[in-house]
């Protein structure tokens, strides 16, 4: 069997180590809004909502997914205790939505939160306008809105997700619990070896909870500048859950939102077991890739197979240390970088990234006939040469009255400004350079891309992505086919505090 093996690779900087892949005032206002004296109560479950409350999977039928998603503030069970979180349909993570290419989605969204919000369908190739993936919408408290769109017939199978995307509130609302998975079933799921594997979804998310079960908000602007992280790590809302695999068997882990976390990076390693990567953000690879670690940044997803070919026992899924940047002002890299400066080596005080943590456990249970890995998956298209190349610089600056703002090409986000324009049915290369002091995961809405090079060195893996890590001091070139949909959409850093502090731009796609 031919199997692609890599001992140290980056998929656009998102995967390392044997791998591939890769404002305070506002928070204070929200905290006072949900104080003990004024805490909103869960709405009574009307008939159109009650059938969905607590249902963990909502699947399309006869070409239609017709569901209600109720965003609310209330008590949910988190690691066997009650926590007061923002949630969808009473669940953290929210219900999994499963569709197939060609399905019509009609989602009635009810905002029972104490603040405005909206929805972003991260990774879906659907219109960025109207009542589809329109992040410029503002759904006020108490309002209902119907999202409606069709999954394209040629949409790739994959793991996607939904979360709020109201600028200025995105990180806070995600950190409070709002996120859920979307699965598009398709050709990848029908490959015999993949189909025979037992499937599990892992939604990895961090929280910071006080003794009253409330989310702890950032105590100062510095925490937002770094990107908030929580000390409590969960997988599917649990602490160190156990997943079973039979000896000889094959387990399919779809690590969906390992970034339902707004800022935290996850450097994953499974004790004594390699991962076999079969899909990234935008769908299937052409063949499995063996790797010992996966670095998963905010917004990214992976689909991996695990073989039950070790001595029966219990094996730990680790989150290994990772340094995503510091607030140094002088030293190794000048004003910015990973060195010690005037402020020393600065980290989020809730961040445990200097230590190895156990996220979950793999336990051997029973025995089955040996299952083999697939030799081939789905060919990945090679894109033509671009018609144009554009350059983007990710940085930061001090702004009077605002403190630190995060910038793309020297500009903080303005929804009224178009930052770049693209033509439908063309291919562009974007060169993205990080001259700042933190690693920045770069996310593009609506269209997938392929990573062409890093610092001028060709990328060896041909894969579809929607998020790519651009480390400090590096340049990544991506190639984007603008297909099917016109209108305004956005690109931004997926450390969502950085996005809320300005690191987002508007691209207008014209027909």
Image (cartoon, rainbow, N blue to C red):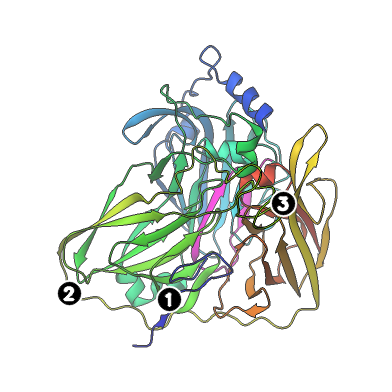
In the image, residue 115 lies at what x, y percent?
A: 63, 28
Q: Tell me which segment is drawn in magenta.
A: 148-166
| Residue 390 lies in the magenta-colored region | no
Residue shown at 57% from the left, 56% from the top? 104
Q: CA distance from mark 2 to mark 1?
A: 29 Å
- Front residue of this view, candidates 13 and 478: 13
Q: Is residue 152 magenta?
A: yes
What number is the disc on residue 7?
1
User: In this rendering, would 285 be left or right of 388?
Assistant: left
Reading the image, the residue beneath label 2 is 369
Q: Going 64% across and 69% down the picture, which residue do you hit?
A: 449
363 versus 37 height, above or below? below
Which comes sooner in the sequence, label 3 or label 1? 1
Crowding at dot 1, Cα within 10 Å, few <14 / some 14-19 / many 20+, comes out as few
Q: Report whether 159 appears left or right of 138.
A: left
Image quarter in which the N terminus is found: bottom left
Q: CA distance from mark 3 to mark 2?
A: 58 Å
Q: Depth check: 254 or 102 in front?
A: 254
């Amino acid at each position: 069997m031919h199997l692609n093996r890599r001992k140290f690779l980056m998929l656009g900087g998102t995967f390392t180590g044997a791998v591939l892949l890769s404002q305070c005032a506002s928070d204070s206002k929200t905290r006072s809004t949900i104080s003990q004296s004024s805490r909103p109560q869960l709405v009574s479950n009307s008939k159109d909502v009650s059938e969905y409350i607590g249902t963990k999977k909502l699947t399309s039928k006869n070409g239609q997914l017709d569901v209600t998603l109720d965003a609310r503030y209330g008590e949910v069970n988190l690691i066997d205790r009650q926590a007061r979180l923002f949630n969808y349909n009473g669940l953290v993570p929210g219900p999994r939505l499963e569709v197939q290419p060609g399905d019509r989605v009609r989602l009635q969204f009810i905002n029972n939160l104490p603040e405005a919000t909206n929805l972003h369908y991260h990774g879906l190739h659907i219109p960025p306008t109207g009542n589809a993936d329109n992040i410029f919408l503002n759904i006020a408290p108490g309002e209902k809105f119907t999202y409606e769109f069709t999954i394209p017939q040629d949409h790739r199978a994959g793991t996607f997700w939904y979360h709020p995307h109201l600028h200025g509130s995105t990180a806070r609302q995600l950190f409070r619990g709002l996120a859920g998975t979307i699965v598009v079933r398709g050709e990848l799921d029908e490959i015999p070896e993949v189909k025979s594997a037992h499937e599990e979804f892992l939604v990895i998310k961090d929280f910071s909870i006080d003794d009253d079960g409330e989310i702890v908000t950032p105590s100062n602007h510095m925490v937002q500048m770094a990107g908030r992280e929580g000390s409590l790590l969960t997988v599917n809302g649990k602490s160190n859950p156990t997943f079973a695999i039979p000896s000889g068997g094959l387990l399919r882990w779809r690590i969906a939102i390992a970034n339902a976390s707004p800022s935290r990076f996850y450097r994953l390693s499974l004790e004594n077991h390699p991962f076999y990567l079969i899909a990234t953000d935008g769908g299937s690879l052409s063949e499995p890739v063996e790797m010992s670690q996966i670095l998963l940044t905010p917004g990214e997803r992976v689909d991996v197979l695990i073989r039950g070919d070790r001595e029966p026992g219990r094996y730990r899924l680790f989150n290994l240390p990772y340094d995503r940047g510091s607030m140094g002002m002088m030293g190794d890299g000048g004003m910015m970088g990973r060195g010690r400066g005037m402020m020393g080596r600065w980290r989020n005080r809730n961040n445990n990234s200097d230590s190895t943590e156990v996220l979950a456990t793999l336990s051997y249970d029973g025995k089955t006939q040996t299952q083999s890995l697939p030799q081939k998956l789905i060919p990945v298209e090679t894109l033509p040469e671009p018609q144009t190349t554009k350059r983007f610089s990710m940085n930061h600056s001090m702004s009077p009255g605002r403190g630190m703002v995060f910038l793309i090409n020297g500009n903080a986000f303005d929804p009224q400004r178009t930052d770049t324009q693209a033509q439908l049915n063309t291919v562009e290369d974007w060169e993205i350079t990080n001259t700042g002091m933190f690693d920045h995961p770069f996310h593009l809405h609506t269209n997938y891309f392929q990573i062409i090079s890093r610092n001028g060195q060709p990328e060896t893996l041909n894969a579809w992505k929607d998020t790519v890590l651009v480390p400090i001091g590096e340049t990544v070139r991506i190639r984007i086919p603008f297909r099917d949909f016109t209108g305004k959409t956005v690109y931004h850093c997926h450390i969502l505090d950085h996005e809320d502090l300005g690191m987002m731009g508007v691209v207008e796609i014209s027909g």
